Amino acid sequence: MVLFFAKKNVLLLLLKANIVMSANRYFTKSEWCEFRSNYCRLVELMRDEIKYDEIKALRKIVRSAIDAGSLLRDEHDINPLLRCITTATLLCDKVGADRDIIIAVFLSPLVEGGYMLLDDVSSLFGEDVVKLVKGLLKTNELDSKQGAMSSEYFKNLLLVFADDIRVIFIIIVDCLCLMRMINNHPDDNYRKHITVEASNLYAPLAHKLGLYKIKSELEDLALKYSDRETYNLIAQELNATKKYREDYITSFIGPVKAELEKANLKFEIKGRTKSIYSIWNKMKKQQIGVGGIYDLFAVRVILETEGADEKSDCWKAFSIVTNMYTHNPRRMRDWLSNPKSNGYESLHATVIGPENKWVEVQIRTRRMDEIAERGLAAHWRYKGIKSEGNLDTLMNSVRDILESDNDDPLEKIKDFNIDIYDKEVFVFSPKGDLYKFPDGSTVLDFAFHIHTKLGCACTGARVNGKNQTIKYELKSGDTVEILTSSTQHPKKEWLNIAQSARARVKIKQALNEIENKSAELGRELLSRRMKNRKIEVDEAVLMRMVKKMGYKTVTTFFLDLGNEKIEVNEVIEQYLAIIEKDHQEEEQRSAGEYILDTKPISDDKVDELVIGGDIKGVDYRLARCCNPIFGDKIFGFVSSEGTIKIHRNDCPNAVNMQERYPYRIINARWAGKMGSKYVVTLQVVGHDDIGIVTNISSLINKEKNVFLRSISIDSDDGIFQGHLSVAIDDISTLNTLIKKLRTVKGVKDVQRGAM
């Protein structure tokens, strides 16, 4: 890149002469316009950051790389040079990048492609650039096949994070750049993959780091690509009411501006509308249209105050606004007295403006606004911490959760915390070893820090010779000896006592292990009792019973069974009651749907029920317990009401009926294809992968003469359990469908079940 000369005309001249002599070959027309625009913006922002000699070196490297074919489009037709310069510009605009970050953005693809060595980067641009390039290479080495939401990906990402937070800033902004570039990308699967990463990983991380503008744009673009119809609907409605909103905000701001000026406050005041994603989220939760959103309008008051008067001026402005307009105390947010862990400081008030509409007013100083816009990076600049400084002390909470076995990265993000306001306490073990903890840490945090087993068995501690509970808050200079008991086990309340991310992760892990053991005991107990009573377990019936008992997941059901919260014999009775009800329930069929006939089999003179003959008047039903379809081997069973029920030969109840009521059994067979559909239930088990339901339903819809009537799913601990109801012609079609379903990615097994 011809980076960062002092004058634009010289810059553009060198840019054209040295790098893009063959722009028509390297860029499309629209890409070239975008590249040139970003280039001018980047030069403007980085004018005082990069030396002339470094510009020359960088220009030569990039020009040679293009000539050598080392900056070709990737497999998804993304132009790497356009991506680099757009990411660099966004970093300057939205985060506040320095010289090292910008150079690293351009050099990392060259090092990754083997065109440049790290030793060369070090000699030309210094070790800090090398450190950043290494971090970016680490993120690129993560297994992309697993997807961004895999546990291993997230652990590795946090590991890079703990080494240098600037790498995370870069990849978050790079994700935003990529999301902008794929708006019209022809590969839907690629766009879907990037969208899932953006919404489920990078948007939450951006939120944690205080990069709220980036977070909002990532969420908006994710909604646009995943549900373009809804996105366009909201965007069109906002566009249609744009003039009204502008007039409304002007009418709201006018009186506020006058009162603030009377108070001799220096300020900037501006209004905005909530993001499309935020509006959609509220519409979904509140079941309302755009016009009914509680606080669609937002006004920001930015005070030009510095030093000790910051907070007092914010509260002065707050009192002026709330005196003019009635405010809702429940919606008041005080982030001045208790700033967020990412440095966010502001006062929020929701007031009733003109026309009785709710308006959110955010009050902050210019410094606070800079931190709100650019997150932690801005906070460190204000605190005088150089970006190239050692940030490990601010990243300890990240390392604390890396050992977790929790496979839910979103749960990790909740535990993930960087608290730049933390004070520290220093305590001693009985042997004199010194340990450092955040202020507010408890005996429980100390125990889990020493060892997980010690934490799980902790009942309290002797602190400075006195017995204390696990809730005792540690103080600098304390000598702590942990007390344990073999009967002690972790409890959910401990999550409210532990303050460190490490202790919380270990507690959650221990609780999960206890629950899994109890659930397994419950499963074994039910299986053993049913086996003793010679009852064959039908998974479909069991699932129906579990849901009927009010449980959302099978795991929770087995957990209560293992903990003896429900009695196993009562469960078995409920199971048998459902089976009996299935036996007795008559399925309503139209009179002409099935026709029965009896005729003797010539060789053994035994009467046989034939489905498809001409003689009417025989009352029969297809049994719900096994749901036979054309092609199944079948037999008839005369019920106590005189109705003949048709069962499959492999029906779970066949053996019992044949042993107890052999005189009620009638031979039966199909006479010919009936031309009608049979309803069959399929049980599908597999990994809870993204899109598995869509893939299954799509496959079924493509099958000729197969119709999907209903689908119910249950997901637990990453395992997908689905129950499909399909209308089908015969057993041959069913067997073909089952074989195809077993080939769907993520599906482990498919079995035919009962209705």
Image (cartoon, grey):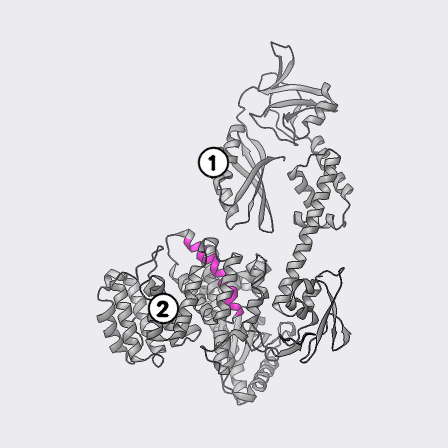
Residue 352 sits in quarter: bottom right
| Whether residue 505 is situated above or below residue 597 in the rendered picture | below
| The label number, if any, that marks residue 703 in the structure image | 1
- Tell whether label 1 touches label 2 (CB within 8 Å): no
Is 330 placed left or right of 293 in the picture?
Answer: right
Amino acid type indicated by mark 1: Glu
Closer to the camera in the image, 672 or 616: 672
In the displayed structure image, the side of residue 241 where residue 535 appears, left or right: right
Question: Residue 287, percent across and down?
Answer: 58, 58
- Asked whether 193 falls inside the magenta stretch, the response is yes
Query: Against 692, is 682 above or below?
Result: above
Quarter of the image where the C terminus is located: top right
Residue 325 placed where, x, y %?
60, 78
Residues at marks 2 and 1, CA–CA distance in whole angstroms: 55 Å
* Residue 277 can be seen in this image: yes
Magenta region includes residue 454: no
Q: Which amino acid is tagged 2?
A: Leu
Q: x, y percentage for residue 243? A: 45, 70
Q: Secondary structure at mark 1?
A: loop
| Magenta span of residues | 190-208
Q: Name the residue tied to disc 2.
A: 118
Q: Closer to the camera, 104 or 172?
A: 104
Viewer-nearest of discs 2 and 1:
2
